[in-house]
Image (spheres, helix red, strand yellow):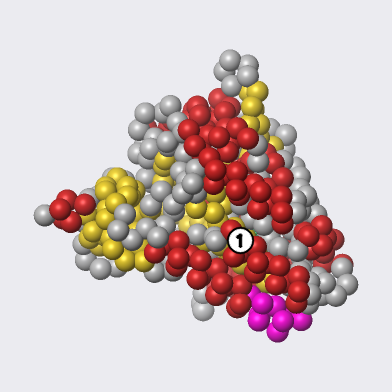
Amino acid sequence: MTKSFRIKSFGCQMNVYDGERMAELLGDKGMTEAKDGEDADLVVLNTCHIREKAAEKAYSDVGRLKKTDGTRPMIALAGCVAQAEGSEAQRRSDAIDIVVGPQAYHRLPELIEGASKGLRPVDTDMPAISKFDAMPARSKVGPSAFLTVAEGCDKFCTYCVVPYTRGAEISRPWADIVAEAESLVDRGAREITLLGQNVSAWSGENEKGQTGGLELLVRRLAKIDGLERIRYTTSHPADMDEGLIAAHGEVDKLMPYLHLPVQAGSDRILKAMNRHHTAESYLKLIERFRAARPDMAISGDFIVGFPGETDAEFEETLAIVDAVRYASAYSFKYSPRPGTPAAQMEDQIEPAVMDERLQRLQSRISAHSLDFNRSKVGETMSILIERQGKRPGQMIGKSPWLQSVFVETDAPIGTMIDVKIEQALPNSLGGRLKEKVAA
Ligand code: SAH
Ligand code: SF4
Ligand code: F3S
């Protein structure tokens, strides 16, 4: 019998959330999580399929789990690679005992039982019944918690696998989300990040029968005592509404931070990506957020080297970076993914060209991040302490703008303290306790 388990999650925050829920489920069935360095009877690889490198990592990890004496733990391939490849994954590697997709992991206990009997179960169903209904109560809770409110994506950007690996867009019901948020706060969460591949498409009906979008939900969650901060990610520029923008100016607990990927700055490329927005409509949207909340930090995602992208079109991406002045942003080289329309497009870009573009883009983004961070030097801000730093006495917390802040303090994890910022780096801030500054 399998008694201990380890879950390794890759990819996006939704996978992190799913990993926590799987751990809670296995714990509820009497299994225990293996400590660092300890062998586990079962290893769940909760994988990501978004780019080729991420997907290949799943298989190299499977290989590494085989020990020199030939033994290995039971291996469950979960997440988006599992969904995309199904039983094909087991043909590629005979060490994969279980394949379980992101919408089927509530059935993990039965699948483990099957594997214990020597079967090689595969479950990539996307059942109509929500997996969340079959899950035990939340127990793995830190000061900053994730809460998945919407799953799947109907946008079908031409480069992206998510609509295939996560399925159609579904909003979790209002009452379930409110109950889960309350239980997270009861267990010590002070910040909740609402998650969805396309979280801005969330819609639902509240207890009064009013229907609405994310704004309505945010305003309700803001009433939970003990919850100090609300965030949401990831949004799509084509479905942001006035209500949510206004909420940023009105709801104190809603943090001044927006992750709004644009992907590229050229309208021709955006069209080929099937993004449903233009560079100009995106910039107008950012302006509206900044009008509601002038200190709004903007973050984004970029893809360089989409098929057919010319030098001039890439320059338009740099131009949008300068226009927005991102507080932070992720950027990636385009990776052709099986089954996506862009993988079939002509004019795939040479790797060397992509490398050069990525480097230029990243140095431009870093410069803006540093500017943004420098603008906070001298300011006193509230920090939510999340973990210990490397140096003795050092703790790391998050600012309202999602910057990591290093500070020397004996304040424990989960507390909120006022910190005066003294130092800015491209990816973090250094500060000092406010009381110490005054002394
Ligand atoms: N739902 C979110 C996040 C999707 S995945 C959104 O719409 O933005 C996170 C990021 O990975 C994307 O924003 C995109 O920048 C990047 N990405 C997705 N598919 C990719 C691919 N085939 N090659 C390179 N980057 C990709
Ligand atoms: Fe992928 Fe586009 Fe959906 Fe984001 S909006 S998950 S990039 S298809
Ligand atoms: Fe990766 Fe799946 Fe998330 S492909 S980015 S883990 S939705």
Asked if 207 appears above or below 204 in the picture, the reply is above
Where residue 61 appears, as percent x and y from the top left, is 57, 70
Between 26 and 168, the residue placed more toward the observer is 168
User: Can residue 354 be found in the magenta stretch?
Assistant: yes
Label 1 amino acid? Answer: Ala
150 left or right, relative to 396 = right
Q: Name the quadrant containing residue 239.
A: top right
On the image, which quarter does residue 253 sit in?
Answer: top left
Is 85 one of the magenta-colored residues?
Answer: no
Q: State which region is magenta.
A: 350-358
Residue ID for mark 1: 323
User: What residue is rendered at 48% in x and 57% in y?
Assistant: 6
**Which of 336/244 is in front?**
244
Q: Position of residue 405 (x, y in %)?
A: 34, 59
Find residue 383 and report its horizontal and vertical position in percent: 33, 50
Looking at the image, can residue 69 be seen? Answer: yes
